[in-house]
């Protein structure tokens, strides 16, 4: 008998732009391993076909219940060329980064934190869904400020870096509904990511997402409006 649990899935990226309606624009393959020590380890391979195309491979270790990050890594290829690779390490008082980036070279960085980082934003779509854990199951709909977030890139596509980029934003839990996606029909929770203008160089367009209504909080469906007009949907799930 194993003392861990593994979840695997695939997320399809499609366009909602009028001239590309429902055309495939990328894909994501992920594995989440919930370990007996109370941590989860996420592996995600992400591909964005839009020029310049992006290939991102990430790992992320975090507390299964609280989402508090422990460590992670990100490797990027942009436009068919290596962009950078970095390893992130989190303590209660700092986030450290060992990185090689083609724009800035080799560096060791450390950013002091007044309080521990709450979430590591590595730009994997499945990872966005875990934000829902900040609203415990059974709680009433509402809005929270998610502070002390550490991003691996301020770019909306995550197409720079890796780097240390602190951020806070708003998260709204609007309620529950039943939705059907490529992977099946699920009881879901609906969320909106808002109020990013204070931290990002350019405010992120409106972002709505649905996650499974259970302790796993797996991303089911999401969409970004504005200039991006993208759609994300879980098409395969094994747990």
Image (cartoon, grey):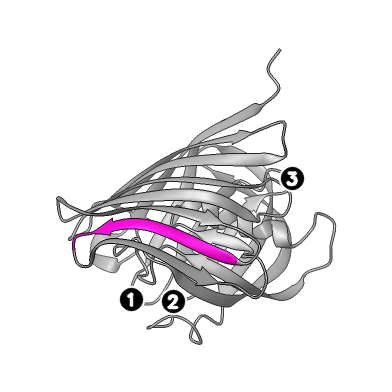
Which residue lies most toward the top here?
A: 1
Considering the numbered disc 2 on the image, is that residue within a helix, a strand or a loop?
Answer: loop
Q: Which residues are magenta?
A: 94-102
Query: Who's the residue at 76% across and 74% down the image?
Result: 142
Q: Closest to the observer: 126 or 4?
A: 4
Q: Earlier in the sequence, mark 1 or mark 2?
A: 2
Q: Secondary structure at mark 1?
A: loop
Cα distance between the residues tagged 1 and 3: 32 Å
Q: x%, y% of residue 191? A: 63, 65
Whether 156 is among the magenta residues is no
- Location of residue 154 by image quarter: bottom left
Q: Nearer the viewer, mark 1 or mark 3?
A: 3
The answer to whether residue 193 is visible is: yes
* Left or right of 105 on screen, residue 10: right
Residue in the image at 50% along x and 74% along y: 166
* Residue shown at the point (74%, 45%) measured from the top left: 214
Residue 188 at x, y percent in the picture: 68, 51
125 or 168: nearer the viewer: 168
**Dominant secondary structure, magenta:** strand
Q: Secondary structure at mark 3?
A: loop
Q: Measure the C-alpha gap from mark 1 to mark 2.
A: 7 Å
Viewport quadrant of the N terminus:
top right
Q: Please say if the residues under marks 1 and 2 sit with CB atoms less than 8 Å apart.
A: yes
Mark 3 sits on what residue?
214
Which residue is the site of mark 2?
Answer: 205
In-front residue for pair 42/14 = 42
- First in sequence: mark 2 vs mark 3: 2
Mark 2 near mark 3, Cβ–Cβ under 8 Å?
no
Q: Outermost residue, bottom direction?
A: 198
Residue marked by disc 1: 227
């Amino acid at each position: 008998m194993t003392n861990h649990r593994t979840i695997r899935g695939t997320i399809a990226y499609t366009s909602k732009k009028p001239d590309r309606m429902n055309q495939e624009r990328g894909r994501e393959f992920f594995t989440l391993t919930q370990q007996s020590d109370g941590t989860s380890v996420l592996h995600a391979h992400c591909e964005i076909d839009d020029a310049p195309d992006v290939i991102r491979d990430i790992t992320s270790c975090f507390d299964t219940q609280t989402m508090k990050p422990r460590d992670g890594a990100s490797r990027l290829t942009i436009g068919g060329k290596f962009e950078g690779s970095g390893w992130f390490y989190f303590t209660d008082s700092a986030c450290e980064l060992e990185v090689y980036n083609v724009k800035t070279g080799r560096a060791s960085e450390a950013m002091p934190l007044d309080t521990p980082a709450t979430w590591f934003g590595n730009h994997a779509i499945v990872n966005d869904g875990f934000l829902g854990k900040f609203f415990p199951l059974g709680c009433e709909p509402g809005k929270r400020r998610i502070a002390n977030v550490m991003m691996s890139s301020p770019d909306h596509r995550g197409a720079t870096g890796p780097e240390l980029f602190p951020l806070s934003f708003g998260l709204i839990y609007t309620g529950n509904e039943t939705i059907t996606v490529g992977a099946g029909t699920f009881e879901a929770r609906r969320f909106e990511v808002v109020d990013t203008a204070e931290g990002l160089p350019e405010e992120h367009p409106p972002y709505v997402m649905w996650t499974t209504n259970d302790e796993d909080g797996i991303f089911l469906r999401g969409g970004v409006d504005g200039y991006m007009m993208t759609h994300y949907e879980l098409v395969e799930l094994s747990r």
